[in-house]
Amino acid sequence: MQELTFRSHDEERTLALGSFLGSRLEPGDVLALWGELGAGKTLFARGIAWGLEVPREVPITSPTFAFIHEYEGRLHLYHMDLYRLSHPDELDTLPWKEALYGRGAAVVEWPDRLGADLPPERWDIEIRVTGDASREILLRAVGKRNGARLELWAPDLFDLRSESGEPCRRG
């Protein structure tokens, strides 16, 4: 198994999936969030932060203008938003290499902006808008190690169901 698809009918379900993933992240994990503007990438990142035990009173906001926000939890979390990035060299003054290759976990919005610098071992999470508050979320394990982890998580992931009781699909 290399991917699973979830249906989220509201923000609460999206946060729950993000929190599930955050609670299982290990040092060096990179989550690449794909989706159009307004798809819910920052909301999903908030769920990941909560799963990493970042206190809920800490605001998790989009780092669009700062490029990187950092949070302390069970692991150090780097939340990157590269929407405004025109070339990876623009990140040279920021700790982006530490974020992607360090001992913390990294969430990257607009990961395509990294080009060849996007780590080959990562989680690709594609968020597709299906309604005002509903989303389809594709979780793809990229790399052998992550594929094995997804297999281990699958039973618990299948317990995460939408409000309608609709299960996720295996890919």
Image (tube, helix red, strand yellow):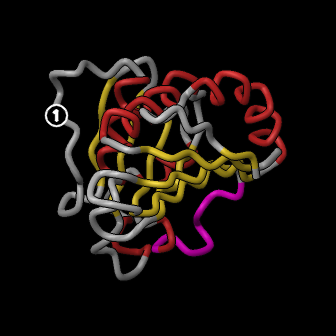
Compared to residue 23, the image places residue 61 above or below, namely below
Compared to residue 66, the image places residue 116 above or below, namely below
Q: How many marks?
A: 1
| Residue 96 counted in the magenta span | no
Q: Is residue 59 left or right of residue 40?
A: left
| Residue 114 counted in the magenta span | yes
Q: Is residue 135 left or right of residue 60?
A: right
The residue sitting at 40% across, 40% down in the picture is 14
**Residue 93, image quadrant:** bottom left
The one of 61 and 96 positioned closer to us in this rendering: 61
Compared to residue 73, the image places residue 158 above or below, namely below
Q: Is residue 151 left or right of residue 85?
A: right
Find residue 145 and report its horizontal and vertical position in percent.
80, 39
Find residue 32 and report its horizontal and vertical position in percent.
52, 55
Magenta region's main secondary structure?
Answer: helix
The residue sitting at 42% across, 23% down in the picture is 52
Amino acid type at mark 1: Pro
Which quarter of the image is occupied by the N terminus? top right
Q: Dot 1: few (<14), some (14–19), or many (≥20) neighbours within 10 Å?
A: few
Q: Which residue is mark 1?
A: 59
Looking at the rendered structure, the secondary structure element under dot 1 is loop
The one of 158 and 71 positioned closer to us in this rendering: 158
The residue sitting at 38% across, 42% down in the picture is 78
The residue sitting at 72% across, 30% down in the picture is 154
Residues rendered magenta in the picture? 113-120
Find residue 25 and report its horizontal and vertical position in percent.
57, 29
